[in-house]
Image: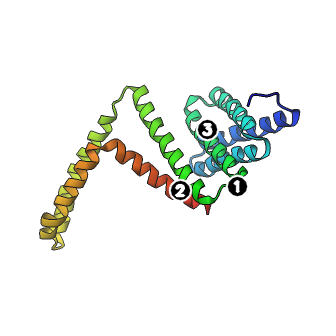
Amino acid sequence: MFRNLQAIEIAEGALLADIAVAFQFLVAFLPVGSGFFSVMNCTVFTILVLRRGIYVELLAMCVALFLVCILIGPHGCISLVSQGLGGAFLGLTMKHRFHYIPITLLGALAAATYLFLLTIGVAWLTGIPFDVYVHSLHHAYEAIIPIVALVAQRVGLGSVWQQNLYPQITLFSQWIFTYWALTFYCALLIVWYSYTKWWMR
């Protein structure tokens, strides 16, 4: 994989790395429309993979990360890494002419796994246990349930709520809070599958 780069590869990689840094500036400082430039960043890295290969794309991503760290700060690196890896994945699958179904499935699986590990890693690095967020969600759930019960009673569905809906929701919520890691991963998988499917269209 490691090899000497040709002049055209260095020039094109540097140019697209500069474009990625410029887009990251817009993502960091524009109050609206940052999502569009995040997608454009992913497209930049995808084009680089298609034109010059994964090695040049990874080097360009490292250069862009270095520049972003110096010019903006490390807070922009996580999103840039995500965009670079997404562009690398999409570029490789397009280069090898994968069908859209495995692209969708593999993309959703890879993105969900990456974000899950990233979230757990950030929680570990900051020293805040993930259980704190789970307990916060549990308190929010306990606050919402009485409101839902009151609304159901007002619309004449109090008995249906007490006898049918509430026991099922309680069992389901207990399972979710007990296996929160699996629930979180499955939620990420569903969200990214929907997003990847929409993107492939």
- Residue on which disc 2 sits: 195
- Residue on which disc 1 sits: 97
- Residue on which disc 3 sits: 80
* Among the two numbered marks 3 and 2 on one chain, the one whose residue lies closer to the N terminus: 3
- Foreground residue, 103 or 158? 103
Q: Quadrant of residue 101?
A: bottom right
Is residue 26 toward the left or the right of residue 1 in the image? left
The residue under label 1 is which amino acid type?
Answer: Arg
Crowd band around label 2 with a 10 angstrom C-alpha radius: few (<14), some (14–19), many (20+): some
Residue 4 position, x and y percent, is 82, 27
Is residue 118 toward the left or the right of residue 150 in the image? right
Q: Quadrant of residue 124?
A: top left
Q: CA distance from mark 3 to mark 2?
A: 18 Å
Which residue is rendered at x = 52% and y = 51% of the image? 108
- Foreground residue, 153 or 62? 62
Secondary structure under the numbered disc 2 in the rendered image: helix
